[in-house]
Amino acid sequence: MADVRPNASDNGTEITTGPISGSRKVFRGTESGLQVPFRRIELTNGEHLDVYDTSGPYTDENATVDVHSGLHRMRAGWADGREHRTQLGWAKAGVITREMEYIATREGMPPELVRDEVASGRAVIPANRCHPESEPMIIGKKFLVKVNANIGNSAVTSSVEEEVEKMVWATRWGADTVMDLSTGKRIHETRERILRNSPVPIGTVPIYQALEKVNGDPAALTWEVYRDTVIEQCEQGVDYMTVHAGVLLRYVPLTANRVTGIVSRGGSIMAAWCLAHHRESFLYTHFGELCEILRAYDVTFSLGDGLRPGSIADANDRAQFAELETLGELTHIAREHEVQVMIEGPGHVPMHKIAENVRLEEELCGAAPFYTLGPLTTDIAPAYDHITSGIGAAMIAQAGTAMLCYVTPKEHLGLPNRDDVKTGVITYKIAAHAADLAKGHPRAQEWDDALSKARFEFRWTDQFNLALDPDTARAFHDETLPAEPAKTAHFCSMCGPKFCSMKITQDIRKFAEERGLTSVEAIEAGMQEKSAEFAGTGGKVYLPIAD
Ligand SMILES: C[C@H]1O[C@@H](n2cnc3c(N)ncnc32)[C@H](O)[C@@H]1O
Ligand SMILES: Cc1ncc(COP(=O)(O)O)c(N)n1
Ligand code: SF4
Ligand SMILES: [Zn+2]
């Protein structure tokens, strides 16, 4: 088993490094020689499986990581000698950028398809040129479904070091992007440490820090404070920003009779500002200027759903869909500025109302990638909302959502810790992969088939190592059968040796093979044997018990 080497930081919080059990990092070269990482799972039968790898150098045995100096600035210089343009701008000009080339290898798709999806706005590549540490990735419905993990401190709890470790931990288990939603102390410094050490794109909600700058009073916010905060974050390297520009003054009354009102933080802040001044949102009135700022850095818009439903009762109501219409209008404005856009979605939605969300989003927002929070499919299970929302996430991803924002077991109850982050990420990797399978992604099933085969052949170590969470899979097995010989045993403690159905199946196949029969013939041969036996006993169904 691979060792996990803790890398101590200032205050003793450890940064997790070392390969995931049973795998190692390998690189595949692109046409122009870019090195794209994969996680290679080595199997005991001599085969191996390479899977998508979000974890950066932290899982590379041959890399040294120092959280004080930050990650290697891989993309520094990639845009040298070129005029500043966004990925959307290049794609529309017919140019395949290095980011697109890298992504094509990463996704196993043709570079021209990557370019075309970006050009049409159906996919985005969040890659601020001030975040050269990040490994290029794409968000779009034709590609693998992605997962975002939310982290960040609050006024109540957490430190910079803990948040950096949450980022490393989330990407270790497969988070494709991370949002720093800090609202507590040292917001700038926390984000700086996360950015310099993150191999994945980082998203933020700038209005949170702007509110902090005006001491938490929404009415005191101004366009100028907001604009300067956005520029500060662009300079730091934030790759995508949630902007709740669809919360219009006239939509606020539509939430009056809701069961849970406005549950979006950004949405509630903007609604409070609009009402306090009885003016249209400055995010809406200054949207063009905002586009110009984001364009200069190639920061992607994540148009926020400030009026998303926060309960089953409020799903798909007028407030929610009125805002979505405005997000559609803003999408087209951003695209005219060649700024990339994705659209944030709900929230809390019962299963029968999920598909309508995707249909409307695609229709109103020019098929911009949809990025949804779950949705939670019922409100009755606080402490299990990774599951209530994992169900909705799988469904909405199958319907075409490109990125799923995880929900952890702590949702509605408190700030998630490191363990909650892992539970949230693994839950959402399941939803995302289940959707990849359902959508017929050409290579998704390889992984399932490799695991199924290992399971049927009782290659226990391979079954663990192929798992999304190898450590937990192994620990669960070993709880009852820890001895080494059990790693090749033809049963586990669920059914035991005599009732293991897969073992019995293998016996059937062996029986057939020994007689040179196909399985169906074997069953018939077996039945004939049995019926001869039956006839031999005088055709009685119940036999007298011998004494
Ligand atoms: C919009 C989503 O963001 C989550 N959220 C808000 N702040 C944080 C944080 N600091 N850490 C993790 N998740 C957060 C909410 O719980 C909601 O699910
Ligand atoms: C998918 C997703 N992630 C994050 C947020 C921001 O949070 P909030 O809207 O509460 O400010 C959001 N609206 N949607
Ligand atoms: S999660 Fe907690 S702090 Fe956030 S809106 Fe709900 S009750 Fe308020
Ligand atoms: Zn909620």
Image (cartoon, rainbow, N blue to C red):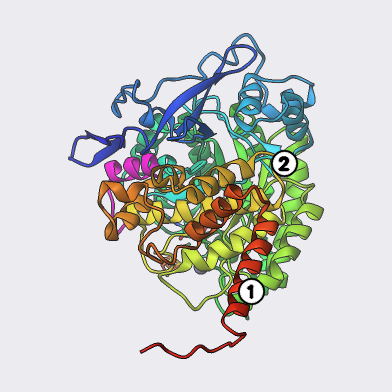
Q: How far apart are marks 1 and 2 (CA)?
A: 56 Å
Which image quarter holds the C terminus? bottom left
Residue at 71% across, 52% down: 400
x and y percent of residue 220 in the render? Answer: 47, 55
x and y percent of residue 94 in the render? Answer: 79, 21
Residue type indicated by callout 2? Lys
Q: Residues within 10 Å of mark 2 (few under 14, many from 20)?
A: some
Q: Is residue 61 above or below residue 14?
A: above
Question: Are the residues tagged 1 and 2 within 8 Å (C-beta)?
Answer: no
Residue at 35% across, 63% down: 493
CB of mark 2 near ligand 2 (< 8 Å): no
Image quadrant in which you'd find residue 340: top right
Residue type indicated by callout 1? Ser
x and y percent of residue 221 in the render? Answer: 50, 52
User: For mark 2, what is the residue?
Assistant: 142
Q: In this view, does 312 lie above or below 370?
A: below
Over which residues does the magenta segment extend? 154-169
Between residue 354 and residue 513, name the one nearer to us: 513
Q: Is residue 418 magenta?
A: no
User: For mark 1, what is the residue?
Assistant: 531
Residue at 61% across, 67% down: 529
Image quadrant in which you'd find residue 104: top right
| Residue 280 visible in the picture | no
Between residue 295 and residue 173, name the one nearer to us: 173
Image mark for residue 252:
none
Mark 2 residue element: loop
Mark 1 residue element: helix
| Residue 296 visible in the picture | yes
Residue at 71% across, 20% down: 96
